[in-house]
Image (tube, helix red, strand yellow):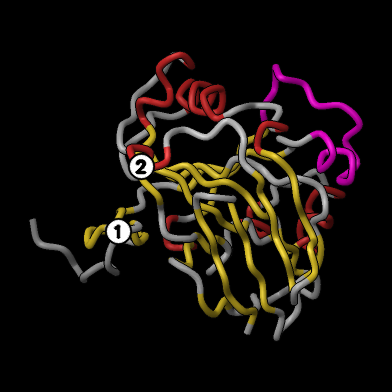
């Protein structure tokens, strides 16, 4: 079958200690997965019966750190540091007890958000895709393979901006741990190899401006350094 034009290369992430790269299929994100962040965003309670999911385009990644362009149409860009899980297997209706068998590895990333646009859309009761799914909205570190680092249930997740700590928490504080996230997502979508899952952000989200330098870390597993340009 002939194509009308060539597509861009498949988005991909570097893998620590491996020349091969991880091809990205889809990017799934969960919101309100740390109680303290849910409260700072105005939600007093979070129901485990209703996880909040949204998506970013695969080519929204900024792989491995470096310069991140300040997006258009916003005056209030916010950082949200998150553990990122990369899947090598997928399926539908995956049991949480077997969900980690799907996970290839882990990294750390930023769910960048045009907060002013998100607030405006929320106030109108409208979808807020434009606040989350813009170009370069998903900087992600190199991945560490689960065969090397295991499947962390405790690890410090942190973000500093210009040397000042903005966010810090343990991933054990997640309301939906990763096996539950995979299980819940697989009820809604057929998960595929190459999928990334952003697992939620703790409290302390705040603005980034041009010239800011950031350093995100999933302690002992992954680091991501870059600048807003």
Quarter of the image where one finds residue 173: top right
Q: Which residue is mark 1?
A: 17
Q: Position of residue 141 (x, y in %)?
A: 48, 60
Element type where label 1 sits in the image:
loop
* Label 2 – label 1 distance at C-alpha: 10 Å
Whether residue 155 is situated above or below residue 135 in the rendered picture: above
Left or right, residue 206 beside residue 144: right
Left or right, residue 58 beside residue 224: left
Residue 162 among magenta residues: no
Whether residue 145 is situated above or below residue 72 in the rendered picture: above
In front of the other: 127 or 163: 163
Quarter holding the N terminus is bottom left
Q: Position of residue 41 (x, y in %)?
A: 86, 45
Q: Which mark is residue 148?
A: 2
Range drawn in magenta? 35-51
Element type where label 2 sits in the image:
helix
């Amino acid at each position: 079958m002939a194509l009308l034009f060539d597509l861009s290369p498949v988005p991909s992430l570097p893998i620590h200690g491996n020349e091969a790269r991880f091809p990205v299929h889809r990017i799934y994100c969960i919101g309100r997965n740390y109680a303290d962040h849910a409260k700072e965003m105005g939600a007093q309670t979070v129901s485990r019966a209703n996880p909040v999911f949204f998506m970013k385009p695969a080519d929204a990644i900024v792989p491995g750190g470096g310069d991140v362009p300040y997006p258009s149409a916003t005056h209030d860009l916010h950082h949200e540091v998150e553990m990122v899980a990369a899947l090598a297997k997928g399926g539908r209706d995956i049991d949480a007890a077997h969900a980690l068998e799907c996970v290839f590895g882990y990294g750390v990333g930023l769910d960048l958000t045009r907060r002013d646009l998100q607030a405006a859309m929320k106030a109108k009761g409208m979808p807020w895709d434009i606040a989350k799914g813009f170009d370069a909205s998903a900087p992600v570190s190199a991945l560490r393979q689960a065969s090397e680092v295991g499947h962390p249930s405790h690890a410090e997740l942190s973000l500093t901006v210009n040397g000042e700590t903005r966010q810090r928490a343990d991933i054990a504080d997640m309301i939906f741990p990763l096996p539950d996230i995979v299980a819940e997502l697989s009820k809604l979508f057929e998960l595929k190899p190459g999928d990334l899952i952003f697992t939620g952000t703790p409290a302390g989200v705040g603005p980034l401006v041009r010239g800011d330098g950031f350093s995100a870390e999933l302690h002992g597993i992954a680091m991501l350094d870059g600048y807003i340009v």
